[in-house]
Image (spheres, helix red, strand yellow):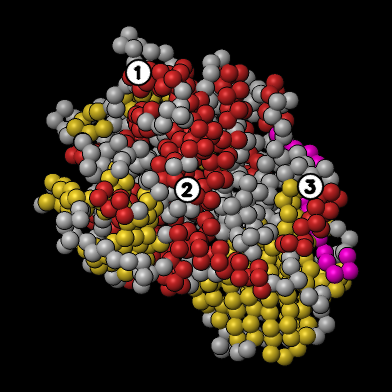
């Protein structure tokens, strides 16, 4: 197959029709097509809808008796054990209930406003979380007077666990350790006349234990405990509500109701009393007397958000499912990624659960609301997939927590490297607590060495190169020089320095990376892994191309030296079955392909490390040399996977394999979960919702429409002829590309600024 790139110039009037913005679709209007309506009450937490403002969220559901329940969450609610938990659960009951037995009942998630509305006749309820303040508002009107009761429900109790259990998985990942753990209960404050409040205050912390177990006690005085004295909770109040006890508010009979839940997460509170005083100070702005202005500002935030970018696909039922799945994933990220810390891949803030009897520990089948499989460490290879697509959507505010975590951990990573290895630089473990050290479960309890015990994670560090690549994309798209100079370059220099200094150089002057691994699939004995080499060969030239005002001569010299010392990408032959050889030993008569590493053993996972050259590092692809080699490597991949963290969709789109990309993006966006809100993606390897599944789908769909290549903008590189789309995406050099595709053909295009239109190229296959 031969690829032809056709440049679009002002002379090729038939190539595109450039029109004014008037009459073009906008994201806020298009996304209403993905709104979701249910016409019956729910039963339990598995019937919830998600809402959030980025730092405060809730799973919202109804139950058979008409109760409205909110499971309130935050990406920043971390306990003394390093466990991400919910803030609490709030139950709202109207008596008599206006929604019971009503044939015209509806519950609608309005994506365009970030709100949920319920209707039956003239009875209405609106639930929304203020996009600009940490407050949840429930506004209701009933045709006939009713009594409203609000109840706080908490499940956390003081509890000690010694034996291994799934309940301990929040701290110890897989829960197989026998270190004693003390779970602390929340504090429910004495009720005030018109409000109730509660909080969780970390009066102790597992942080010193983790640091000592990992031989980092010398660093304790240099890096503050990120868990100690963290305090989180909320206050509930509302129009006409009076406290009945410390957990209950109640109204007299009336027809108009309002319930307000105002939350606060404080990283370093001196006490619960101090936290409450700070919360009280915030009430005036977070919970105004008149909500009209706050509601209008909330709607504006969401409309502006949807107008940043959009992809609306049509053509058949599967196209519409892809379109709705894309919108739902982006909505969940907007609802959960504007806090201090990034949202987690294994459920984000939208995990659910229920109360358990005393003495019963959570497991995968029966668990409390704080449970999540795979624990609370960040797994870079999973979490990255949530954040890669946010560059082309222009959702840079949602990217900040992801970048912030790696940047805030840099000083500790440099100190850890010096302490362990006695050389400068920084490496980030694949699976790490948010402050930057490995999971204790992986490192090993009472491990006498500085080496991670887990063979799955021991040498798995390449994820930091991906973070740098994402940061470089952000810089290319925004031109944010201050970020590049003050944040990105220090991180990149430390990581590149680690690779330059950690392994010896051979007689040829090249770095020999060994012992190491190629992702999790080829462990312990790999030599010169392809993802790491590809990452360095991708990011170093981009770093060297930065303005001289951003980088120093010393950095230029060091990076150039490292680039010149890198080994070549490993090549070999396919095995007798035409696939990537499982042990590195191919058939001499086989096709030439890229290998996972120069040397490697038998696979222990289902990844294709050799294809990191296409995504995330884009060394190979359309309009670049070696396309046949990359396509042959893709065809020979040993582990096809089209959902969860599988990369078939993205890689095929980068390589212009349209049929494969279309098939995979359908699989990704129809990998529905078993909950009523089916976009709480099925947990193929992770937990519910499997957000890296939705992230992979977003990346694939974006790459099918638009692929930047330096200054060039490759348009429709893998777009199927039977699908249409309206789209607006962001591109390098502060560019947006907006247009319409009808049956695979571009019929309308706006490139902003106009000067970038000359850089647009169309990709066509010549059979």
Helix, strand or loop for disc 2: helix
Quick one: 40 or 536, which is closer to the camera?
A: 536
In screen coordinates, is 104 left or right of 587?
right
The mark found on residue 279 in the picture is none
Q: CA distance from mark 2 to mark 3?
A: 30 Å
Using the numbered discs, state the Cα–Cα distance from disc 3 to disc 1 in whole angstroms: 51 Å
Quadrant of residue 628 in the image?
top left
Q: State the image quarter where residue 50 is shown.
A: bottom right
Is residue 342 in view from this perspective?
Answer: yes
Direction from residue 594 to residue 430 in the image, left or right:
right
Magenta stretch containing residue 60, yes or no?
Answer: no
- The x and y percentages for residue 687 are 53, 52
* Viewer-closest of 6 and 349: 6
Extent of the magenta region: 192-207
| Mark 2 or 1, nearer chain start | 2
Vertical arrangement, residue 636 with respect to residue 118, above or below: above
Q: CA distance from mark 2 to mark 1?
A: 31 Å
Q: Is residue 101 visible?
A: no
Q: Which residue is mark 2?
A: 387
Query: How far across and down, in percent of the image, does residue 75 sit?
Result: 62, 51
Q: Looking at the image, is mark 2 or mark 3 earlier in the sequence?
A: 3
* Residue under numbered circle 1: 565
């Amino acid at each position: 197959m031969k690829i032809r790139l056709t440049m679009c110039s002002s002379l090729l009037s038939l190539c595109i029709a450039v029109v004014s913005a008037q009459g073009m679709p906008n994201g806020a209007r298009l996304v209403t097509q993905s709104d979701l309506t249910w016409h019956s009450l729910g039963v339990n937490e598995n019937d919830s809808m998600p809402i959030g403002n980025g730092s405060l969220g809730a799973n919202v559901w109804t139950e058979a008796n008409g109760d409205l329940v909110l499971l309130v969450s935050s990406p920043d609610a971390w306990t003394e054990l390093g466990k991400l938990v919910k803030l609490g659960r709030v139950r709202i009951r109207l008596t008599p209930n206006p929604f019971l037995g009503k044939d015209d009942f509806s519950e609608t998630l309005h994506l365009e406003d970030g709100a949920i509305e319920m209707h039956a006749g003239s009875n209405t309820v609106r639930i929304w979380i203020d996009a600009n303040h940490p407050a949840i508002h429930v506004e209701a009107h009933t045709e006939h007077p009713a009594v409203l009761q609000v109840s706080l429900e908490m499940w956390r109790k003081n509890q000690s666990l010694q034996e291994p259990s799934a309940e301990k998985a929040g701290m110890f990942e897989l829960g197989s350790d026998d270190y004693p753990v003390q779970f602390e209960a929340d504090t429910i404050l004495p009720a005030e006349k018109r409000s109730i409040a509660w909080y969780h205050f970390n009066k102790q912390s597992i942080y010193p234990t983790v640091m000592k177990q990992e031989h980092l006690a010398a660093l304790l005085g240099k890096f503050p405990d990120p868990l100690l004295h963290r305090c989180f909770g909320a206050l509930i109040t509302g129009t006409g509500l009076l406290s009945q006890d410390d957990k209950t508010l109640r109204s007299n009979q009336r027809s108009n109701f309002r319930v307000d839940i105002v939350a606060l997460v404080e990283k370093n509170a001196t006490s619960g009393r101090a936290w409450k005083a700070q919360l009280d100070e915030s009430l005036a702005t977070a919970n105004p007397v008149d909500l009209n202005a706050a509601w209008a500002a909330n709607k504006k935030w969401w409309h502006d958000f949807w107008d940043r970018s959009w992809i609306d696909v049509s053509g058949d039922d599967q196209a519409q499912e892809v379109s709705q799945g894309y919108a739902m994933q982006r909505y969940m990220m907007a609802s959960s990624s504007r806090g201090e810390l990034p949202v987690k891949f294994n459920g984000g803030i939208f995990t659910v659960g229920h109360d358990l009897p005393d003495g019963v520990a959570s497991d995968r089948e029966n668990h409390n609301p704080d449970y999540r499989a795979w624990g609370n460490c960040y797994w870079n290879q999973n979490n990255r997939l949530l954040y890669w697509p946010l560059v082309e959507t222009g959702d840079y505010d949602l990217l900040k927590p992801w970048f912030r975590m790696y940047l805030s951990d840099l000083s500790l990573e440099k100190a850890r490297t010096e302490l362990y290895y006695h050389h400068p630089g920084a490496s980030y473990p694949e699976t790490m607590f948010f402050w930057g050290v490995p999971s204790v479960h992986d490192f090993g309890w009472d491990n006498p060495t500085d080496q991670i015990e887990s063979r799955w994670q021991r040498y798995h560090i390449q994820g930091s190169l991906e973070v740098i690549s994402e940061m470089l994309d952000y810089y290319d798209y925004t031109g944010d020089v201050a970020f590049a100079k003050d944040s990105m370059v220090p991180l990149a220099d430390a990581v590149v320095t680690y690779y330059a200094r950690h392994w010896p150089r051979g007689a040829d002057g090249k770095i020999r990376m060994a012992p190491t691994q190629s992702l999790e699939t080829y462990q312990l004995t790999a030599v010169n892994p392809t993802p790491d080499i590809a990452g360095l060969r991708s990011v170093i030239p981009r770093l060297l191309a930065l303005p001289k005002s951003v980088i120093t001569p010393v950095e230029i010299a060091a990076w150039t030296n490292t680039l010149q010392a890198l080994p070549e990408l490993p090549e070999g032959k396919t095995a007798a079955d035409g696939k990537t050889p499982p042990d590195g030993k191919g058939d001499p008569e086989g096709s030439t392909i890229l290998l996972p590493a120069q040397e490697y053993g038998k696979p222990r996972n289902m990844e294709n490390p050799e294809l990191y050259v296409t995504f995330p590092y884009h060394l190979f692809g359309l309009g670049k040399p070696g396309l046949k080699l990359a396509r042959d490597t893709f065809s020979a991949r040993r582990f096809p996977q089209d959902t969860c963290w599988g990369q078939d969709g993205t890689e095929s789109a980068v390589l212009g394999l349209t049929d494969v990309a279309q098939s995979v993006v359908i699989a990704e966006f129809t990998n529905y979960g078993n909950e009523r809100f089916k976009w709480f993606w099925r947990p193929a390897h992770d937990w519910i919702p499997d957000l890296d599944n939705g992230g992979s789908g977003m990346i694939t769909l974006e790459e099918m429409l638009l692929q930047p290549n330096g200054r060039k903008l490759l348009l429709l590189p893998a777009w199927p002829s039977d699908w249409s789309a309206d789209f607006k995406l962001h591109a390098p050099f502060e560019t947006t590309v907006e247009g319409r595709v009808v049956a695979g053909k571009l019929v309308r295009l706006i490139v902003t600024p106009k000067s970038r239109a000359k850089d647009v190229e169309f990709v066509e296959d010549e059979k």
